[in-house]
Amino acid sequence: MIRKVVIVFALMMGQLFALESVPPEEIDGFWIWVALFTLGFIGIVILFLSSKQMLSLKKMYERMFSKQKEIEQKQAYFLTNISENIHNMAKEALEKELKGVSEPSRSAKKESRLEKVKDNLLEATNDLIGFLRLKSKKVKIERAAFDLNNVLNEISGSICSKFSGSKVELIFDIEHNTPVKLVGDSLHLGQVLYNILEHRIENLNDELLTLHIDLVHTEEGIVTLEFSFKDNGEGMSTETLENLFIPYYIEEKKEYRGLGLFVANELIGMMDGNLSVESTLGKGSTFTLTLPFEVTKEQETPYALEEIPAKKRIFILDSHYESALAMKKMFTYFRYDVDVVAKEKFVKSLLTLSSYDVVLLEEALLDFKTLEALKAVKSTKPLKVVSINSLLHVQQTQYLNDDVVDKVLLKPLTQERVFELMKGLYPPEKGEEQEEIVHTLKAKVIESDLSESKNITQESFKVFSGRKLLIVEDNIINQKVLTNLLRLSGMEISIANNGREAVDMVRNGKTRFDLVLMDINMPVMDGYSATQAIRYEKQFDTLPIVAFTALLLESEIQKMFKSGVNAFLSKPLNIGKLYTAMALFLLDESSSVSVEEVVNVPVAEIEYVSLDVEAGIRHSNNNEALYIEVLKEFLSAYGKSDQVFATLVREQRYAQLKMLCLDMKGLTGSIGADDMHEEIGEIYKLLLYNKFDLLPTYIKVYSKELMSLVRSIELYLEHKEG
C-alpha cells in the first residue's frame, strides 16, 4: 500500500515541476488539487500507522487475555481444591518421610507430623474465613493503643512454631527511632507481618531473612513506619512477581502459594498502607511495607530503665555478622557499650573477655576450649554468659544447666526481650524487689505444659454446665470459634476484647467468674498487665486464670506466672488441652465424671439436602466449631449472590461473573455443597468457552441451587445452636 502511495506522490511531484508549461489562469486550480492530494496522502499515512498500532494493541490484548486465562485457571484450581489437596499433600509427605523408619520411631514421627498437618489445615481454614470476611466487607480496621513488642512476640512465636527446624536465619532489626507505643490495628498488623514472613520462609532454604523496622516520616502525631523484609535467596522471576498476589496451587509440588499474600495485600490497602516488591534472580528479594500509625503519650519512657543496670560492657559473637549487628542495635538502645566480633577473629578475642560484663555467644561456638576460658574469667569477676540460639532452629541448649552459662537467648529479638534479659541477669538485691503480687494465690498453679485429653468433642464440655467463663481475646474469629466450640456446654460465657475490659468485668462484680481464659498479646492492655491488675485485689486469689500464648519461651512463661496466671495454653488452640485446663480448675477432685462418659454422647443425625456436613467438617480440620463459623461467613458473603449473578448476566459483565464463579467453586467445594459446586462448574465452562448466549438460562438454576443450599445451612445451624 505504501509503495502505491509513493508512486502516486512521485507522479504528482512530476506534474509540479512541469508548471512552466501551464497557463497562469490554471495554476491556482492546480495548487488546490495539490493541497487536496497532499491532505489525502497524509490521511492515508495516518490510517496506515493507526492500523499498524491497532494490530500491535490487538496482539498485546491477546497476550494479556491469554495470561488472564492462565491466572484464572490457576486460581480456579486453587479454590476448588483448597481442602482436599492439603489432605493429599499431607498424606504423601508423611508416607515419603516415614519410608525406611522403624515402627516405634515411625509411630512417634507420624504423630508429630500429623500435628503439623492439623496446624496447616487449621491455618488454611482460618485463611478461608479471612477471605470470606474480606469479600463480605466485614473486616474493620480498628484503632487502639498497642505495644509493637507484643505484635513481634506473637508473630515470632507463630512463625517459629510452624517452621521449627528451618535453617533460615530470621532477624528483627529495629532502629532506635522506632516508637513502640502506637495506636492502630495491631491484630491486622500482626496478620500482615506473619503472612509476608511465612511466604518468604517457605521460599528460602538456609538464607538470611531480615525484618528491618524504621520510622520514615512523622507529621502532626502521625508516624509512618517502614517494614522491610529482605533476604539473600534465589530471587523471583518477572512472571512470579506478576502473579505474586494471586492464590494458586502447584500440582507437581503439592503446595499452595499466594493466599496469605492476597489477604495481606487487601488488609494493607484497608490500613492506608503500601506494599512494593523488588527481586533480582540470584540476589534475593525485598518486600517493603509502609503503614501510618498514631503515637501515644507514653513514648518518652516505654521501658522502666531503673529496673536494669547501667553502664555495662557487652560482647556479642554470632555466626551471622548481620544478626550480631542487629542485636548490638537492641543493646545500644539501652545505652550499653557493645562490641561485635567476626567469627574468624573470635579466638584472639578470648583473651580480652575479662574486660566485659556480659558475653553473648552463639551456642554452636561454645566448645570445651571456650567454656574453659569463660570459666576462668568467671572465677575472677562476676561475668554473665548468655548462650544465643534461634527459635527456628532445633534447640540444643545443652549448656543451659552448665555452671558457665547464665541465660539462653533465642532469636529473633525485640527490645523488650533484651530489657527482660538484663533484668534477669541482674535481679534487684534483697529488699529492693517490686511487689508484683502481694499475696499468695489460693488456686492451684500448673507451670508445666498441660497434657491433652483424648477423644474430646463439643459434647465433652457439658460437664462444665452452669459455670461462668470469661474469654479475653481480641481476635473476633478466635472468639467465635471458642464460643461455637462451647455452645453445647451450658456454660455462661462472657467476652472481653482486651485486658482493660477484662479487668473492669471482673472487678464490677456483676458476674462472679469461675475461670478466665486470657490472651497474652492484646491492644489497650495486654494479658500480663490485666492479670496483675486482677491479682492486685485479694478477693480474686481463688479465680483461675489460664493464659493463651504463641511464644513459648522460658522467659515469657516465667513472666506469665510472675504476673499471676495459674496455667498456660499454647497457640493454635488444642481442644484436648483446653478441656484438660478447664477440668483442672472447674471439676471437683471428687467428681466421678470422666472424659470417657461424655465423649460419646449420641447426636441426632439429620440429612441435609444440599450440604455434605461430614465433608465440610473434615475440610475444617475436623473442628465443627470452625466449620460452623465458615458457614456463617459464607451466608453473609454469598447468601444472596443469586441477585448479583442475575445482574452480571443481564449487564453482560463477564469478567466479574468469572470472579464470582471462581469464588463460589472454591467455597462450595470446601463446605461440602456438592450440587452447587457442580452447577457452578458448568457455568464457569460456558464463560471459558465464550458461550455467553446460554448464560441467561442459568439464572434460575443458580438461584434454585443457592436457595436450597442456604436453607440446608440454616437448618444445620438451627439444629446445632438450638
Image: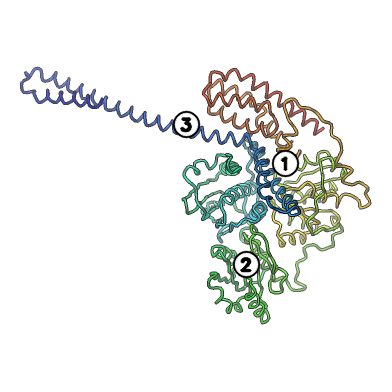
Residue 280, percent across and down? 46, 50
Q: Judging from the image, what secondary structure is the residue with disc 3 in? A: helix
Q: Amino acid at mark 2?
A: Ala
Q: Using the rendered image of the protein, determine whether residue 520 is visible from the camera's viewpoint.
A: no
Looking at the picture, tell me which residue is in the foreground, 611 or 210.
Answer: 611
Residue beneath label 1, please?
621
Q: Earlier in the sequence, mark 1 or mark 3?
A: 3
Quadrant of residue 720 within the rendered picture: top right
How much space separates mark 2 and mark 1, taking CA atoms? Answer: 38 Å
Residue at 48%, 46% in the rendered image: 237
Q: Amino acid at mark 3?
A: Phe
- Which class describes the residues within 10 Å of circle 2: few (<14), some (14-19), or many (20+)? few
Residue 55, percent across and down? 36, 29
Q: Judging from the image, what secondary structure is the residue with disc 2 in? A: helix
In this picture the colour scheme is rainbow
Residue at 51%, 32% in the rendered image: 69
Residue 550, percent across and down? 70, 53
Q: Earlier in the sequence, mark 2 or mark 1?
A: 2
175 shown above or below 639: below
Which mark identifies residue 364? 2
Residue at 77%, 60% in the rendered image: 561
Which mark identifies residue 65? 3
Whether residues under marks 2 and 1 lie with C-beta atoms below 8 angstroms apart, the answer is no
Q: Amino acid at mark 1?
A: Asn
Q: Using the rendered image of the protein, determine whether residue 603 is visible from the camera's viewpoint.
A: yes
193 shown above or below 27: below
How much space separates mark 1 and mark 3, taking CA atoms? Answer: 37 Å
Residue 605 vs residue 378: left or right? right
- Which class describes the residues within 10 Å of circle 3: few (<14), some (14-19), or many (20+)? few
Looking at the picture, tell me which residue is in the foreground, 103 or 605.
Answer: 103
Which mark identifies residue 316? none
How much space separates mark 3 and mark 2, taking CA atoms? Answer: 54 Å
